[in-house]
Image: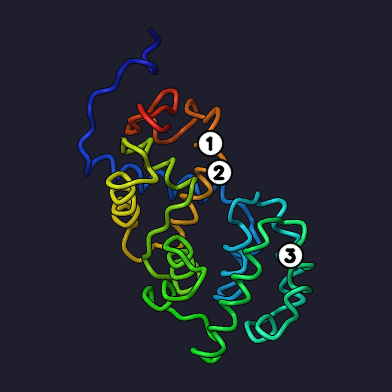
Amino acid sequence: MPPAFRKRPRVAHARRLQHFRRHLLRWYATHQRPLPWRRTRDPYAILVSEIMLQQTQVDRVIPKYHEFLRKYPTTRALATANPREVRKTWYPLGYNIRPARLQEIAREAVTKYGGAIPNRHEDLMAMDGVGRYTAGAVLSFAFRKDAPILDTNVRRVLRRVFGVHGDPMRAPAQQRLWDLAAAVIPKGKGYVFNQALMDFGATLCTARKPACLVCPMQLVCTAYPDGRVDDHG
């Protein structure tokens, strides 16, 4: 068996965490995707991108993101818009409950927060249509807080590198992953680290055929060399 494929000794959690942080940020500095919502700190624009990206590929979202914000540049513009026109603008992204929820969020922002998107986790979570991931994304990407996120890509990366077993959509594995997503963020670097996590999962540590042979996490990844986790991988 080639040396690179031999079973690796267990790595202490602290060493794995340190290696993961350092090499992920180094990888992202070279490989980050130039996505349009990364060029703004407008919480509303970032919220629009996050709702659009739910179960939709990035390349389909980009043109619709620009079109939507041209037509509805603020929460007030969206809150007062004709719902039928909003759905028409959203087409063909699908999952038409999403524009309705986004418009309801905009109305609540106008009613309760003067048109602003709130910057507290509890306020975001109280808004209809905002879940734990979306709240974390807005806090992290718009307000630069060290808030954890856990989407499909982040979940996959954390499970593989740190060896989190069990059904990731159910407790206790789900809670372990949320705790880990918070613990891995270097202090003060929530924005860049979370962006790096998502890009790493989307382009290198992919669901099918992960690029394990060129992965900077080889020395510490529990799933190396084939990207598999024992269950629900």
Q: Of helix, strand and loop, which one carries label 3?
A: helix
Amino acid type assigned to the residue bearing label 3 in the image: Trp
Q: Which residue is mark 1?
A: 206
Q: Which residue is mark 3?
A: 90
Residue at (49%, 89%) from the top-left corner?
112
Q: Which residue is mark 2?
A: 202
Q: How much space separates mark 1 and mark 3, taking CA atoms?
A: 28 Å
Amino acid type assigned to the residue bearing label 2 in the image: Ala
Front residue of 147/233: it is: 233
Residue at (61%, 57%) from the top-left corner?
53
Q: Of helix, strand and loop, which one carries label 2?
A: helix
Q: How is the image coloured?
A: rainbow
Q: Of helix, strand and loop, which one carries label 1?
A: loop
Q: Percent position (x, y) of residue 226?
A: 44, 23
Q: Quadrant of the N terminus?
A: top left
Badge 2 density bin: few <14, some 14–19, many ≥20, Cα 10 Å? some
Q: Are marks 2 and 1 in contact (CB under 8 Å)?
A: yes
Q: Percent position (x, y) of residue 58?
A: 66, 52
Query: Which sits earlier in the primary sequence, circle 1 or circle 3?
Result: 3
Say whether residue 51 is left or right of residue 81: left
Q: How much space separates mark 2 and mark 1, taking CA atoms?
A: 6 Å
Picture layout, residue 230 above or below residue 2: below
Front residue of 49/125: it is: 125
Amino acid type assigned to the residue bearing label 1 in the image: Thr
Q: Nearer the viewer, mark 1 or mark 3?
A: 3
Badge 3 density bin: few <14, some 14–19, many ≥20, Cα 10 Å? many
Picture layout, residue 199 above or below residue 50: above
Say whether residue 165 is left or right of residue 35: left
Residue at (52%, 30%) from the top-left corner?
211
